Image: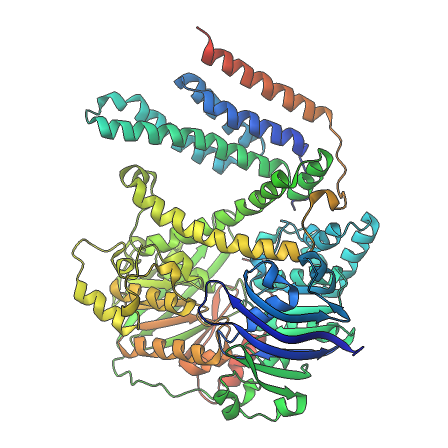
Amino acid sequence: MKNIAVELKDLSFHYQCLTRPSLKNLNLQIEKGSLVLITGASGCGKTTLFRCMNGLVPHFYEGKFSGDVRLGSQNTSAFSLQDFGKLTSSVFQDPRSQFFMTDVENEIAFGCVNQKLSKEEIWKRTDAAVSKMRISELLDKSIFKLSSGELQKVAFASCYAMQNDIFLLDEPSANLDFHSILELQKILEELKNEGKTIIIFEHRLFYLKDLLDRMIILEEGVIKQDYDREQTLSLNDKELEKLGLRSFSLEKLKPVEPMFSTSNNQPLINLSDISFSYKKHGTKIVKNICFSASEGEVIAVIGKNGAGKTTLAKICCGLLKEKSGKIFIKGKTVPKRKRPGLCYFVMQDSDYQLFGDSVENELNTGCKKNHKAEKNQELLEQFNLWDKKDCHPASLSRGQKQRLTIACALKAESKIIFFDEPTSGLDRKNMLCVAEQIQKLAADGKCVFVITHDYEFILSACKRILYLWDGKIQKDFSLTDETKYQVLELLGEGGDQDE
Amino acid sequence: MNKKSILDPRIAAYIVILFGAGAMFMNKAITAHIFCAVAAFYLITVKSFKTSFISLGIYGIIALLMANVSKIHNTSAMLLLVSLSYFVQKLIVLFMMGSFFTHVTSIPYVVSAMQKIKAPDALAVPLMVALRFFPTIHEDFKSLKDSLKLRHISIRPLSFIIHPVRMMEYLFVPILMKSLRTSDELSASAMLRGFEHIKEQTLMYPLKMKLKDYFVGIVSTLIVAALFYLQFKK
C-alpha cells in the first residue's frame, strides 16, 4: 500500500450534459515513481479520468460522481481543489489557456505564491525549475511571444516549482512540433529519474516507448486492457491498429498508396520569386520562393517553428501581401485581393472559421445571394453533416467543425486548399479519416497543402514534401519508401527560428 | 517583459475609473472630444501609437456622422445611428484607458496592489482575469479577421455602420465562444495551482507611491474636474 501513488476504487462519473456515463466502475492502482500511459480512442474517457485524478471532477465539472480517489495514503473525498493541487501537478493539452500571468518568471512562481511561501523560497524554487527545464533564455519574454514547445516547457517548470510528486499530463504532445516532442521526452525522462509518478493521457505513443512502465487502454469509460512494459512493447503495428492506437515505432511505418487515382496533373499554382517581410522588424520571413504544384497533389509543408510555413500559406491565400514576386494560378497572375476564395486556408482551430447560426447557413456566409439549396445538401451529405444542418456550428465536435470548414472551401469553389495541423490531438482512426478526406479532395482535382509535424499522417496522406528552412525551400522531394527516413530526420531537426 | 510597472497600479486604476466614469457624463460634443483627445494623449505617452491613432480615427468618423445626423430624414435610421454612435464613443474612451492600464502596469503588480488595499476577491479575481484576456482577444481578433477575408467579408469600419448586427454576429459571437472555453480552462488551471483568495498569497512586489504617481493622479483629477465644469456650466 505504501508504494501506491494513485488509487481509484469503483470510480464512476456521468456529466450532467451527457446521456451516457464517461467512466464506469473503474478500479486502478498506480505505483509511485512509475510512468503510466493511459490511451484509447477519442471519447473513451481519458480526459474525464485526468480530471478525476486532479479533482476537477467533481469540483469544477459537475455531474454524478461515485467511488474513491486516493492520492498516496489520503482519501480525497473531503479535499478542495487547492488540496489536490498540493499533491498533483497538471499539464493541460493547450498550454496557451493555462497561464495566468503574462510573463514567464511570475507564471512559474504562481503556484508557490498561492501557497504563501516566503519570497526567498519562491525565487529559489523558480530558479531551480528554470535551470531544470533549461529555459533561462525565456525569462524576460512575454507568454504571448513563446512557441508551443516553449509554452509547454514553462507549464512543466510551473508544475515542477510546486514540488509535487504526481504529474498528470493531458495530451501534452497535441500542440507540439516533432522536435518539441523529443524535448518533452527528455523532460519526462528526467522527472522519472527523480522518482516522480507520471501519468500521461495521450494518443501519440512513439515518444513514450523507452519510458513507459505500463499502458492502460480505455474504451467507453472502462479499462479494456492493462499491459505492463513487456506486453506493451510486444504489440506489433497490426495489433495496435486493431486497438485503434497509433504506432510505437515510426521507423517501421511505410508510405501508404493513395486510395484514389489522380490522373489530371495540370499545373495549378506557380510561385515565382516570392518574398515577404513584416513592416515592424523588416526581417525577411519568406525568401525568394519558387515552386509549382498540380491538381491532385497532396503536399506536406514541413519545417521548424518560424521557418515561414504559415506565412507562405497566408500569402498564397491572399491574407498577406508578398513584397516581391508573382503568384500564378492556372497560368494567370492573380493579385492578393483575388486570391481569397481561389485558395482556402483551413486553420488548426476551426472555432475561428465558423460564423453562421446553423450548419447550412454557414455554407451561405459570405456567398453571393443566389444560394443553391441543392449544392448545400450535396456538400453536407458528402461530409456526413446533412443530419446536423440545423445545429449551431459551435455545437459540433472538432472533427465535424473541420469537415464543415472544408465544405465551406468547396462551396467557395477553391481549387487550392491549405491545412494547418489538421491532425493534432487526433487518435489513429480520426487521423486516418482526415487523411482519406484530403486524398478525396486531391482525387477531385484540388491541390492540397498540409502544414504538419505529424509523421504518421504524412505517410498516410502526402506524396510530396516541401521542407522550409529560414524562409526558403531547402528541399522539395517525392515521398517514397526510400525518402521517408529523410522526412523523419528533417522533422526532428531542432529549435525555433525567430520570425 | 511585463514585470515592470511604470505607474503605481493603484494610481493607474484610479485614472482608468476616473476617465471611464467621466466619459459617461459628457454629453456636449466639445467635452466628449477633449476627453477622447486626452485619452489618446495618455496612450501616446506610453508609446502605444497605433492603438491611439486607430481609436482617434474611429472616434473622428463617428463624430463626423453625429455632426451631420440632422441631414438624415428617416427618424428610425437617425435614432439608430445616434444611439449606436453615442455607445461607441463612450466605449472607445474606455477601450483606450484599458489599453493604457495594460501598458503602465502588469498583473503581478496589480495583485500586489489588490493585496495592499485589501480588495475583496469578488473584485480582484475578475480584474486579473480581464487583464489576462486583453492580449488573448487581440490574437483571436487577428485570426478571425483572416477567416472573414477568406469568406469575402469585409471588416472595414463602414461595414459596422451598414450591417451592425451582422458584424457583431461575425466577430463577437466567435470571440465570446472562444473566450468561454479559454476562461474555463484558465480558471481550472489557476484553481489547481491554489488560486482562491488573493489575501492568502505572498506579497511579491511591495508598492510605494512615488512623486510621479502623485503628479499624474493630481493632473488627471484636474483635467476631469475642468471637463466637468465645461460640461455643466450654464
The answer to whether residue B68 is left or right of residue B53 is: left
Q: Is residue B227 above or below residue A263?
A: above
Where is residue B166, by image quadrant? top left
Specify the quadrant that holds the C terminus of chain A: bottom right
- Location of residue A434 by image quarter: bottom left
Say if A445 sits above or below A230 in the image: above
**Outermost residue toward the top?**
B234
Image quarter in which the N terminus of chain A is found? bottom right
Image coordinates of residue B232 in percent, x first then y, are: 46, 11
A418 or A204, nearer to the observer? A204
Tell me if A371 is positioned left or right of A6 in this view: left
Quadrant in the picture for residue A394: bottom left
Label total for image: 0
Taking depth in this image into account, of A250 and A66 the one nearest to the observer is A66
Look at the image and tell me whether residue A274 can be seen: no
- The residue at 75%/65% (across/down) is A164
Q: Is residue A436 visible?
A: yes
- Residue A185, percent across and down? 66, 75
Question: Foreground residue, B112 or A274?
Answer: B112
